[in-house]
Image (cartoon, rainbow, N blue to C red):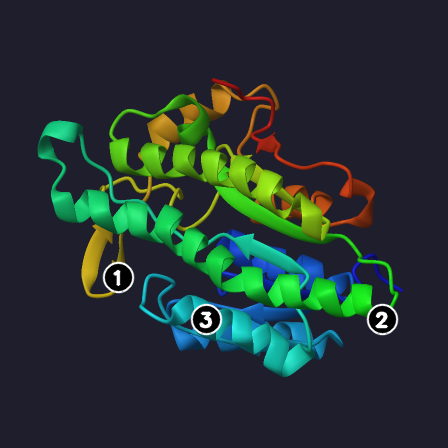
């Protein structure tokens, strides 16, 4: 028996890194999971890992910024598993520059993936959740607690040099969370944010030459952090180290459990004690 038996979750960006660990964690606790990644291969690999452990999952690859993606993603939960109980808006990446060198394309791309895409997914989910609540009420069944966890960052709570676009988007997530907590309380839905600090992923791994890149829809974007800077960053963290993707997933899981049914509109910082 798991804490999330008979629950259905959708998790964006869950083919790799933190998102994959979130999907595995939720599935390990009994949830059926709709997995998403920009690329089909990592999404199907996560599904295979869940299924091999005895869980249920389906892949919906594609960019969260695409027109129509939100409706397709939400529909996958209902069509494959018969409901929707947990929404985790996790997908994203960084495209950094100081403001005088930042282009409109950089600004728009990061706002689209980190803020507009979660907005669209939540908008698409509203009629589904409202309909499920009405069905339960008509049947005289208690309306169980549903969960939304939006992913932010300490860059969104305190700003970060070179990340005007990312910091602004992640700050916007906080406002979106607080608003939806007020709008969706009537559906017995809790809406919270997890703001990550320094978590070790492919975006933050050491890069001595500064030439590490990832491909995002044809754009080659620089990732990685200078090893000396990494060491300095870890010294600023009270726990003395960066977090792991599994630890980051644990923070999200806390806000998906029944034990958090009366926690809503909050921001949980998962940063090893580091606070701006």
Position of residue 126 relative to residue 53, above or below, is: above
Specify whether 210 is left or right of 135: left
Tags 3 and 1 touching, CB below 8 Å: no
Position of residue 17 relative to residue 79, above or below, is: above
Whole-percent x, y for residue 60 in the image: 48, 75
Position of residue 68 relative to residue 229, above or below, is: below
Q: Indicate the quadrant where residue 3 lies.
A: bottom right
Q: Name the foreground residue: 273 vs 133.
A: 133
Distance between the alpha carbons at the discs numbered 3 and 2: 27 Å
Q: Residues within 10 Å of mark 2 (few under 14, many from 20)?
A: few
- The N terminus lies in quadrant: bottom right
Q: How many marks?
A: 3
Whole-percent x, y for residue 17 in the image: 50, 55
Q: Which residue is mark 1?
A: 215
Q: Name the foreground residue: 32 vs 231.
A: 32
Q: Name the foreground residue: 93 vs 11.
A: 11
Distance between the alpha carbons at the discs numbered 3 and 1: 25 Å
Q: Residues within 10 Å of mark 1 (few under 14, many from 20)?
A: few
Q: Residue at x 55, y 43 (%)?
A: 180
**Badge 1 or badge 2: first in the primary sequence:** 2
Q: Which residue is mark 2?
A: 139
Tags 3 and 2 touching, CB below 8 Å: no
Q: Residue at x 43, y 74 (%)?
A: 61
Q: Residue at x 31, y 68 (%)?
A: 67
**Badge 3 or badge 2: first in the primary sequence:** 3
Residue 71's disc number: 3
Specify whether 9 is left or right of 208: right
């Amino acid at each position: 028996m798991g804490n999330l038996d008979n629950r259905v979750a959708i998790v964006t960006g869950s083919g790799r890194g933190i998102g994959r660990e979130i999907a595995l964690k939720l599935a390990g606790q009994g949830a059926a999971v709709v997995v998403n990644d920009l690329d089909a291969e990592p999404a199907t690999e996560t599904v295979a890992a869940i299924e091999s452990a005895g869980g249920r999952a389906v892949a919906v690859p594609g960019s969260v910024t695409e027109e129509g993606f939100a409706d397709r993603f939400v529909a996958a939960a209902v069509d494959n598993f018969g409901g929707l109980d947990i929404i985790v808006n996790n997908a994203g990446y960084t495209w950094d520059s100081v403001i005088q060198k930042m282009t409109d394309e950089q600004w728009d791309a990061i706002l689209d993936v980190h803020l507009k895409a979660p907005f669209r997914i939540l908008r698409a989910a509203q009629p589904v959740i409202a309909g499920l609540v009405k069905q339960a009420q008509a049947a005289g069944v208690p309306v169980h607690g549903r969960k939304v966890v939006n992913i932010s960052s300490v860059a969104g709570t305190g700003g970060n040099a070179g990340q005007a676009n990312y910091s602004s988007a992640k700050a916007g997530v906080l406002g979106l969370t607080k608003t939806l907590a007020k709008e969706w309380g009537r559906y017995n839905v809790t809406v919270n944010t997890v703001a990550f600090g320094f978590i070790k992923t492919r975006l933050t791994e050491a890069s001595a030459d500064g030439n590490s890149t990832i491909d995002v829809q044809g754009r080659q974007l620089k990732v990685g952090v200078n090893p000396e800077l990494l060491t300095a960053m870890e010294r600023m963290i009270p726990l003395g180290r960066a977090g792991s993707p599994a630890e980051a997933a644990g923070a999200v899981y806390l806000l998906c459990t029944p034990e958090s049914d009366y926690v809503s509109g909050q921001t949980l910082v998962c940063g090893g004690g580091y606070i701006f």
